[in-house]
Image: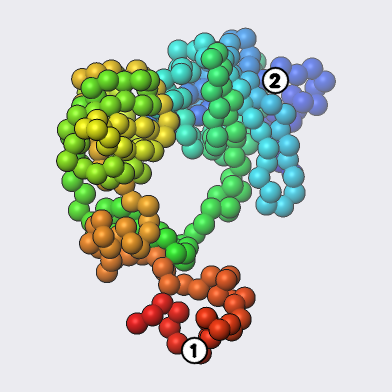
Amino acid sequence: MKTLPPNLQAHLESGTTTLCWCWRIVRRDGAVLGFTDHDETIVFGGTEYQAAAGFTASEVQSTLGLAVDNLTVMGALSSETLNEHDLAAGLYDDAEIEIWRVNWASPDQRVLMRKGSLGEVRRGKTGFQAEVRGLAHALNQPVGRVFAHGCDADLGDGRCTVALTPVAGSVTQAADARRFTVSGLDAYASGWFSGGKLVFTGGANAGRAMEVKRHTLSSGTVAIELWQAMSEAVTAGDGFTVTPGCDKQFATCKTKFSNAANFRGAPYMPGNDAVLAYPTTTTPLDGGSRYGN
């Protein structure tokens, strides 16, 4: 049960209310944005909540227990602070959000209704739709190490220890904002940069990064395909740096990076097949090693 401030409680009991919704968003880059469904801008707590910014919310579902509450916010890309480029650049990914119920006639009469973070954001031609995750969502995230066949370290971090040296290149021709041919990577075999991180150093996307989905070398032509399209157009001459990719497998760690001693997975961990196995003429299960000498 939520306890209301006495002045807001008295306003609700008066029989005539002047209430509105206000949303406060703190983006990944630290920018603080405020929106309201009232027809005039509201200011409180050091934040200005813009009116008529094309930002609305769906019905809120609250449940007992630790289940994640369900809420969706929707917006039209009409506000100066809500635009396609910032959404595509990921500035709103996992952004903090607060949802307030406010008396617009006296903003000091307010109550915090929800607090959480933005999850999946789906974009259209004229608007967007974002999932709001409650605080209980953090309880669904893995904490600590997860033991599996694959490595759970990030390539180049302190546990991996591989020294990554970014390779510089430039775009020679772009099919779109996700697929383009490049120069400067001719010395590397196909797939060397698949799964790596590409950071643009020039052009309209300078400073922005994206993971490489596919790197190919065919007949002397090097092509890069990103997992998602960049927020701005990619054009010939755009410079970038890119780091090698890792598929988290022991064989890759051993042969590609010569780093088997620091592999952070369990490649020889028995799986369900080993648990359910039974002796046969080819697998006697005599207590010996399953992987040879």
Tell me, yes or no, if residue 5 can be seen here. Answer: no
Tell me, yes or no, if residue 95 can be seen here. Answer: yes
**Gap between marks 1 and 2 measured at Cα:** 73 Å
Q: Which mark is residue 287?
A: 1
Quadrant location of residue 197? top left
Judged by depth in the image, the label closer to the viewer, 1 or 2, is 1
Q: In screen coordinates, is 45 left or right of 3?
A: left
**284 vs 89, nearest the viewer:** 284
Q: In screen coordinates, is 168 left or right of 93?
A: left
Name the element at disc 1. Answer: loop
Mark 1: which amino acid? Gly
Quadrant location of residue 174? top left
Residue appearing at x 30%, y 31% in the figure = 223
**39 vs 268, nearest the viewer:** 268
Mark before the other along the chain sequence, 1 or 2: 2
* Residue 252 on image: x %, y %: 32, 58
Furthest residue in direction bottom, as rendered: 286
Residue appearing at x 19%, y 29% in the figure = 183
Residue appearing at x 33%, y 51% in the figure = 246
Quadrant of the snapshot with the C terminus: bottom left
Quadrant of the snapshot with the N terminus: top right
Q: Which mark is residue 19?
A: 2
**122 vs 82, nearest the viewer:** 122
Mark 2: which amino acid? Leu
Local packing at callout 2 (Cα closer than 10 Å; few below 14, some 14-19, many 20+) is many
Name the element at disc 2. Answer: strand
* Residue 64 on image: x %, y %: 75, 49
